[in-house]
Amino acid sequence: LAVDGRDPDVLGGAGDGFWLGPAVLDHVTPDMDAYQDEIFGPVLSVVRAGSYDAAMELIAANPYGNGTAIFTNDGGAARRFQNEVEVGMVGVNVPIPVPMAYYSFGGWKDSLFGDSHAHGMEGVHFYTRTKAVTARWLDPSHGGVNLGFPTSG
């Protein structure tokens, strides 16, 4: 299922200029352009895998390493994922793993231009690869993971 974000009446965007509304591309496979090209928002590509090992193989084989997320109630699986995955931004039960502004935008592999990130501790740790993990754990009585963003008021 692909959502065409160009219609501002459907997605609530402004009608002037070159505006692209949010789009979710689900069931993306490695043979699709959306998988092979590093495209940015507001687009979320959902790639599904049949097993943990298959997911790790997909991520490792991809030339980009900007961000990825795992959705689980299994803390062991989440911990294993955040330690083993080779990307710059990791989400655990968070749909978009973009951390606070003091972590630089950027992944690893072909997602990074230059030899270091632009902000944060990279100025001190010039030759290191940092990993930012954004995680949210709910009480099991909650009944599952709510993928919505928190709201105030």
Image (cartoon, grey):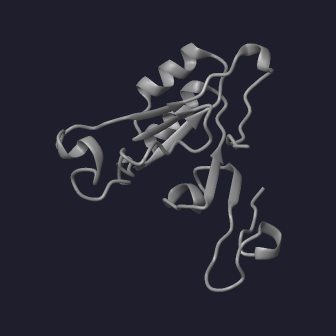
Total numbered labels placed on residues in the image? 0
Picture coordinates of residue 87, whole percent (x, y): 41, 40
At 18% from the left and 39% from the top, the residue drawn is: 125
* Foreground of the two, 84 or 82: 82
Picture coordinates of residue 143, whole percent (x, y): 80, 20
Picture coordinates of residue 144, whole percent (x, y): 76, 24
* Foreground of the two, 120 or 94: 120
Quadrant where the C terminus sits is top right
Apparent side of residue 41 relative to residue 16 in the rendered image (left or right): left
Apparent side of residue 152 relative to residue 39 in the rendered image (left or right): right
At 72% from the left and 72% from the top, the residue drawn is: 13
Apparent side of residue 129 relative to residue 21 in the rendered image (left or right): left
Asked if 76 appears above or below 128 in the picture, the reply is: above
Picture coordinates of residue 110, whole percent (x, y): 35, 54
Asked if 60 appears above or below 45 in the picture, the reply is: above
Apparent side of residue 11 relative to residue 91 in the rendered image (left or right): right
Quadrant where the N terminus sits is bottom right
At 41% from the left and 48% from the top, the residue drawn is: 101
Q: Would you identify the image quadrant in which residue 142 lies?
A: top right
Which residue appears farthest toward the bottom when viewing the image? 16
